[in-house]
Image (cartoon, rainbow, N blue to C red):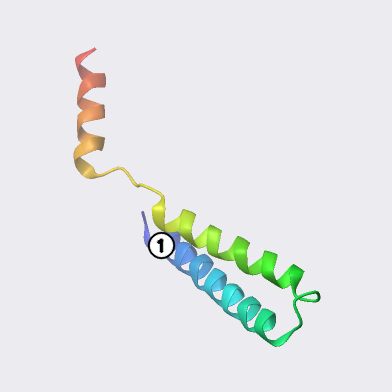
Amino acid sequence: MDDTALLRQTIRRCTAVLVATLAAVGVSLQSPSEASYLLILATVSVMYLAAEFIKVNPTAENAGTSSSTEEER
């Protein structure tokens, strides 16, 4: 990844952390019946963060083996 892509990824992750934090604070300050949308927002933000950190990037070894098999054909 180049520097721009890494910066964009960092900004997305920081924004998701900020949204999840603000939604969690909002849920704790409101009554349960009024906090349903904030709870959904916090849940979606945490799920997005989990998906971002679980996403597997191919390693250099895997990229090298896939290109070598294409060259052998």
Q: Quadrant of residue 27?
A: bottom right
Across and down, in percent, residue 68 comes to 20, 25
Across and down, in percent, residue 59 comes to 25, 44
In the rendered image, which residue does mark 1 sit on? 6
The residue sitting at the top extreme is: 73
Seen in the picture, residue 44 relative to 57 is either above or below; the reply is: below
Q: Tag 1: residue type?
A: Leu
Seen in the picture, residue 60 relative to 40 is either above or below; the reply is: above
Return the residue nearer the eye: 72 or 65.
Answer: 65
Residue at (50% x, 73% y) in the render: 14
Return the residue nearer the eye: 57 or 50.
Answer: 50
Total marks placed: 1
Seen in the picture, residue 36 relative to 51 is either above or below; the reply is: below
The residue sitting at the front extreme is: 32
Provide the secondary structure element on which disc 1 rests: helix
The quadrant of the picture occupied by the N terminus is: bottom left
Residue at (41% x, 58% y) in the render: 53
Q: Residues within 10 Å of mark 1 (few under 14, many from 20)?
A: few
The residue sitting at the bottom extreme is: 29
The quadrant of the picture occupied by the C terminus is: top left
Seen in the picture, residue 46 relative to 58 is either above or below; the reply is: below
Q: Quadrant of residue 5?
A: bottom left
Q: Is residue 32 left or right of residue 1?
A: right
Return the residue nearer the eye: 60 or 56.
Answer: 56
Q: Quadrant of residue 61?
A: top left
Residue at (49% x, 67% y) in the render: 13
Residue at (34% x, 47% y) in the render: 57
Across and down, in percent, residue 8 comes to 49, 64
